[in-house]
Image (cartoon, rainbow, N blue to C red):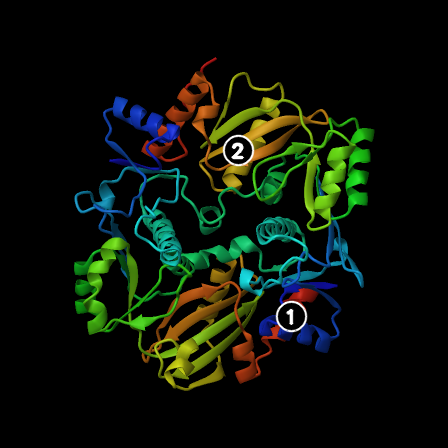
Amino acid sequence: MILVCGGLADGVTELVCARLQDCGYPFRLLDFARFPAGYRLNVRWTDDGPEGWIATNEWRLDLADISGVYARLLGTEDRAPLPGLAPADASVLRTEADLGLMALLEDIACPVVNRVGGGLSNNSKPYQAIVIRRAGLGVPPTLVTSDPDAVLSFQKVHGDVIYKSASGVRSIVRRIGDEQLTRLDRLRDGPAQFQAFIPGRNVRVHTVGTSIFATAIESDAVDYRYSHLDGLTTRLTPVELPAAVNESCLRLAQACGLLFAGIDLKQTPSGEFFCFEVNPCPGFLYYERHTGQPISTALAELLRGRAH
Amino acid sequence: MYLLLGHSNDACCQEVHASLASHHLDARIIASPLAPPARLRWRLDAEGLTSSLYPRLSDEAIEGVLVRDTGWLDPAGWDEDDLAYMQAELRAVMLAWLNGLKCPVVNLPDASQWYRSGVPLVTWRRQLRGAGLKLPEVVITSEPEEAAAFRRRLAADGAAGAVYAPLTNGSSYLLADDDAWGRLAAVQAHTPVCLTEAHGPAALACVVGDHVIWNGMPPPEALSIESGLRRFAAAAALTFIELAIAPVRGEPAVIMVEPRPRLERYDEPARARIVAALVAALRHGAAVDAPRVLS
């Protein structure tokens, strides 16, 4: 039995559930939008690890029967209010329940897509860039600085430069232009991250266990994920990557502790690959719908305990 | 130059600072490492990683860093959203800067540790178990019947009682009577609760590199569990970590893990040994000869 922890209203979770249904793999959904209301949890930790069950009024799932867990957590804005409680009390009690569930997912013996700790490198892009380099992938020339002069020197060397947040917050990529140059003094409030613009085509790699799905993205937008905001179009096609790049992507996912990862690459016109970031909770729906790549099927196999 | 990243009133920063000064070594305690006069230039490209945090101090001249905090940002002048954003940015940058340094960093954090300080003991269970250390039994349950079964089981095993240990904070409450169990059941109507076994008197130990330093007299079982404590610290990739050990059903068990040990909890001889081991780790890396143990 597979346990899916996510919001039913979330498209990616919905796709995972639909794929499991298509495959005929039994699963139970823990609807994170409602949790803990309507759910019962009983876990006992002994020297051998956790044992116990999760239940609703309709079903009961023994932890020993779980072959894999897919977890896609929701923000507080997507959580339903807990009935009969003041908001402050509800917040504490829901956090208590979340921490209990997280503790279970951290320690349960079956594959978990993904354990919380594995995804945290995504909160620091420059730290993740170090991890990416260690895995054998190139990263764009990157500058993190609070020094306006350093930005000007960097721009002089690299010409076209983009900036983006160093954390996972407000993470939209923009090009440096004249307007941004007039605001460089604000760097004294805190550093920002700059990268040489890498020309070429975007490639999104999804690693599922040891399986790899690469998708080439042709777009005129700087950040293709937001191309629709600028009225631009995007085309996605499946692509084969060199074996060395595939191996580095798998190494990277493993280094981050991720059974399922979305890795953003760019392939230059000369064939060089650069890696921008690793997403621990990839919204693969967009890629699967456009290309028909069987990402969710591979995920279902992994959760079923049949991954290669 | 040694950098001690933490608040000026942090006893660990203060005593390490004093010890380094006694060796005629320069050190600074810094609460806000990225605030002026810092002027960060951190570059990563095909040539490798170079960085410079302070205009008058190259990163190569930094001989060691003690990390006690993720960095403080003065909230004055920021609205709530921008403050949260800036805090996230500064933490992200600090993590990268620390991981790019070539000098010893105690504790050099990975992302999981950096963003999850203060996690409950249950989060460490897998690594503690892997290191061969015993742990108290824990139950997380929304079921009053299961809580009652836990209570009966502990009583039958001669345990000292059950403790309600909320995961959202470090507090714990001995469930001493039926009223307490009744109030617990009321909480369980809304959320699962975390219960654990009561334990005997706890002994504190710090692992600093290869050294295990006990506060006061080590417990009789110290020798048998020290190798487990070292294995755990190594598995967690932490040079400096504090654990509390207490008898649980007659066996020593880990009841607390603290990746940012508080020196104030230790007696003078232990503090001196911890500080000596920290200074040695800062000067030479973690794998150093053991400082002489006072007997």
SS class, disc 2: helix
The chain containing the residue under callout 1 comes to A
Q: Quadrant of residue A141?
A: bottom left
The spot of residue A124 in percent (x, y) is 40, 57
Percent coordinates x, y for residue A34 in the rendering: 66, 62
**Dot label at residue A8:** 1
Amino acid carrying label 2: it is Arg
Question: Measuring 25% from the left and 57% from the top, which residue is drawn there?
Answer: A145
* Residue B204 visible, this angle: yes
Across and down, in percent, residue B159 comes to: 75, 28
Pointer 2 chain: B
Instruction: Judge by depth and name the residue closer to the eye, A201 or A161.
Output: A161
Q: Residue at x 49, y 50 (%)?
A: B112
Side (left or right) of A276 relative to A111:
left
Identify which residue is drawn at 62% across, 34% down: B172
Residue ID for mark 2: B230
Of A223 and B253, which appears nearest the observer? A223
